[in-house]
C-alpha cells in the first residue's frame, strides 16, 4: 500500500496525471555514538559471524532469561557497517542444530549471495560454514535474517537477524546514526519461547509474538541526544509476522529513505507509517532545543507501545540548517517504460476465512498447503513466474484474494508501486509491499539483475508453507 505523505511530490514519469499524496497506508541495547570518520578501505573487509545458542532477558528483571540464538554472541546480530563501494567478505559458521542461511533483504547483489537456503545456496548445515561476498551497488539500510525454504520461522523467531548498513560516500550530516531493530517473541509465563511448528496460525496472521524488543531489549529503547541535535534513525521490522503502524510523537520526523533507497523527503501524514516485516525506514529527527524534551516512536498496538524514546540531554548543539536529504542511488533506473513491459499476474489464494463475527473459519483449508500462488505452492523445481532477458521491464500484478494483508518481498530488485490507472508511480522505491486483503496492486521494475530470484511472503510461517514463487533473469 502506498505511504502517506503530507507534502506534494513531483509527478513521476511516464506521463503521470496526478500527484502522489494519498494512499493506504543476549545483547545490551546499541548505544548511539557520534559517527566516526574513517577512510575508505583499500581491500575487502573480512568478518566472521558465529551462530550459536545463547540467553537474553527479553522482559525487564526480575523476569527470567530466554534461550535464544545469537550472532557473535549478540542478539540481534551486530550492525555491520561498510562504505558504498566496499566489499564485505563474511564467513557464517553454524553452531546450532538446524540448517540456516542469512538473507540480505534489500541488497541488489549477486544471486548466489542472496542467502536463501535451499534456493540460492545449500543451507549451512550444523557444524559447517558459508562464505558470503557482498558488494552492494547501493548505499542504504539492509536487513539480514535467517531464511531457509521450509524452515525460516524458527531461526528468525529465535533472534537471527541484524542490520547491514551501507554508508553513503558522503554521509548525511547528523550527530548520531542509530540502528533500531524491532523483533517480537511468543513467550509463555516462564519466558520460554512457544514451540515452533505449523499450527492454525500458519493459515491466518502467522506467529504473532506476545512481546516486542528493540535492539534485543525491552522497550522503550532510550537514547540520549544533545538538545537541538540532528539524528538519523534506521528502523527495521524483523518480526516473523507482526504488521504494525508507527507513530512519531513530540518531534517532526522526516523520511529520507524507504526500504534502503533514498526518496524525496516527506513527513508522514498524521505522523504515521506502515511497518511490515522486512520494511525499513531511514528518518531524520531534529531534537527540540529544550533540555529534557522527548521524542517517541510508538507502535500502534493496543493502546500504543513506546518503542524508542529520544531524550534531550547534555550541552545544546546549534540547529541544523542543511537540507535533510540523500542523493538518489545512481544504479537504479529513473523510469520504467510501462508500454514495453512484460505483464505478469501473481494470484494469492488460500488461508482461513474471517466470519462476520471476526472469527477464523479454517473449513476447507488444507493444513499442508494453506496458501497458494497461481494455484500452487512454491517449488524450486516448479515453473517460474516468468523468465526474461536482462533489462526487460516488468509489471507484476499481485492479486490478494485472501482475508489477510499480504506483505511480499521481491529479491534482488527495487520496484515502483504503480498508481491504480498505470499513469505513474509513487515517488519512492520499495523492495517490500503490503497488499491489502481482497485488493490487487501493481509494481514495476527493470529485471536487471541476472539469476533466479524469489518473490516471497515476509510472514515467515506463510513462507515456510510455500507462499512464494520465483522468476529468472538471463
Image (spheres, rainbow, N blue to C red):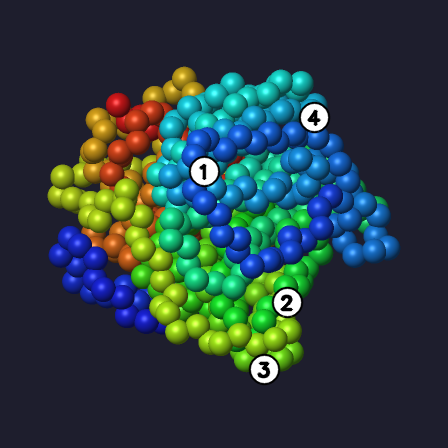
Query: Is tag 4's residue or tag 2's residue first in the polypeptide sequence?
Result: 4
Q: Position of residue 239 (x, y in %)?
A: 58, 46
Q: Which mark is residue 224?
A: 2
Q: Position of residue 195 (x, y in %)?
A: 72, 36
Quarter where residue 22 is shown = bottom left
Mark 2, secondary structure of its residue: strand
Quarter where residue 298 is shown = bottom right
* Distance Cα–Cα, label 1 vs label 4: 33 Å
Label 1 neighbour load within 10 Å: few <14, some 14-19, many 20+ = few
Query: Is tag 1's residue or tag 2's residue first in the polypeptide sequence?
Result: 1
Q: Position of residue 240 (x, y in %)?
A: 58, 43
Quadrant occupied by the C terminus = top left
Who's the residue at 43% across and 62% down the image? 173
* Distance Cα–Cα, label 4 vs label 2: 36 Å
* Distance Cα–Cα, label 1 vs label 2: 31 Å
**Which residue does the numbered mark 1 point to in the structure image?**
41
**Which residue does the numbered mark 3 point to in the structure image?**
290
Who's the residue at 84% across and 48% down the image? 64
Mark 4, secondary structure of its residue: loop
* Residue toward you, 48 or 283: 48
**Which residue does the numbered mark 4 point to in the structure image?**
96
Query: Is tag 2's residue or tag 3's residue first in the polypeptide sequence?
Result: 2
In this rendering, the label closer to the viewer, 4 or 3: 3
Who's the residue at 49% across and 76% down the image? 318
Residue 473, above or below 393: above
Q: Position of residue 349 (x, y in %)?
A: 42, 38
Label 4 neighbour load within 10 Å: few <14, some 14-19, many 20+ = some
Q: As drawn, which residue projects farthest toward the right?
A: 62
Amino acid at each position: 500500500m502506498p505511504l502517506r505523505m503530507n507534502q506534494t511530490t513531483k509527478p513521476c514519469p511516464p506521463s503521470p496525471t496526478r500527484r502522489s499524496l494519498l494512499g493506504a497506508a543476549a545483547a545490551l541495547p546499541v548505544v548511539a555514538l557520534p559517527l566516526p570518520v574513517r577512510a575508505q578501505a583499500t581491500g575487502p573487509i573480512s568478518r566472521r559471524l558465529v551462530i550459536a545458542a545463547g540467553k537474553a532477558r527479553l522482559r525487564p528483571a526480575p523476569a527470567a532469561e530466554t534461550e535464544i540464538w545469537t550472532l557473535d554472541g549478540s542478539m540481534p546480530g551486530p550492525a555491520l557497517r561498510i562504505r558504498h563501494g566496499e566489499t564485505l567478505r563474511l564467513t557464517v559458521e553454524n553452531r546450532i542444530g538446524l540448517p540456516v542461511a542469512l538473507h540480505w533483504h534489500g541488497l541488489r547483489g549477486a544471486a548466489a549471495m542472496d542467502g536463501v537456503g535451499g534456493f540460492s545456496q545449500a543451507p549451512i548445515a550444523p557444524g559447517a560454514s558459508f562464505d558470503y561476498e557482498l558488494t552492494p551497488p547501493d548505499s542504504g539500510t539492509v536487513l539480514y535474517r535467517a531464511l531457509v525454504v521450509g524452515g525460516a520461522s524458527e531461526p528468525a523467531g529465535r533472534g537471527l537477524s541484524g542490520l547491514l548498513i551501507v554508508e553513503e560516500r558522503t554521509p548525511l550530516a547528523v550527530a548520531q546514526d542509530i540502528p533500531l531493530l524491532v523483533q517480537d517473541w511468543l513467550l509463555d509465563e516462564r519466558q520460554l519461547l512457544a514451540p515452533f511448528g505449523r499450527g492454525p496460525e500458519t493459515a491466518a496472521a502467522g506467529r504473532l509474538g506476545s512481546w516486542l524488543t528493540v535492539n534485543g531489549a525491552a522497550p522503550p529503547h532510550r537514547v540520549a541526544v544533545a538538545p537541538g541535535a540532528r539524528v538519523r534513525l534506521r528502523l527495521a521490522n524483523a518480526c516473523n509476522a507482526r504488521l504494525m503502524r508507527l507513530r512519531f510523537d513530540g518531534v517532526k520526523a522526516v523520511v529520507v529513505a524507504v526500504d534502503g533507497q533514498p526518496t524525496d523527503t516527506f513527513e508522514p501524514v498524521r505522523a504515521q507509517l506502515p511497518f511490515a516485516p522486512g520494511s525499513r525506514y531511514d528518518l531524520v529527527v531534529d531534537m527540540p532545543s529544550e533540555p529534557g524534551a522527548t521524542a517517541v516512536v510508538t507502535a500502534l498496538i493496543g493502546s500504543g507501545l513506546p518503542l524508542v524514546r529520544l531524550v534531550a540531554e547534555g550541552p545544546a548543539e546549534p540547529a541544523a540548517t542543511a537540507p535533510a536529504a540523500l542523493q538518489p542511488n545512481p544504479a537504479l533506473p529513473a523510469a520504467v517504460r510501462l508500454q514495453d513491459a512484460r505483464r505478469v499476474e501473481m494470484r494469492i489464494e488460500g488461508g482461513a476465512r474471517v466470519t462476520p463475527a471476526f472469527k477464523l473459519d479454517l473449513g476447507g483449508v488444507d493444513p499442508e498447503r494453506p496458501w497458494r500462488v497461481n494455484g500452487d505452492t512454491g517449488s524450486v523445481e516448479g515453473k517460474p513466474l516468468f523468465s526474461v532477458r536482462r533489462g526487460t521491464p516488468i509489471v507484476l500484478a499481485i492479486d490478494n484474494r485472501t482475508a489477510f494483508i499480504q506483505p511480499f518481498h521481491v529479491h534482488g530488485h527495487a520496484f515502483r508501486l504503480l498508481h491504480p490507472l498505470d499513469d505513474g508511480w509513487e515517488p519512492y522505491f520499495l523492495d517490500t509491499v503490503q497488499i491489502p486483503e481482497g485488493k490487487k496492486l501493481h509494481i514495476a521494475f527493470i529485471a536487471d539483475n541476472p539469476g533466479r530470484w524469489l518473490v516471497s511472503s515476509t510472514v515467515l510461517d506463510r513462507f515456510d508453507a510455500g507462499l512464494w514463487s520465483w522468476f529468472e533473469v538471463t
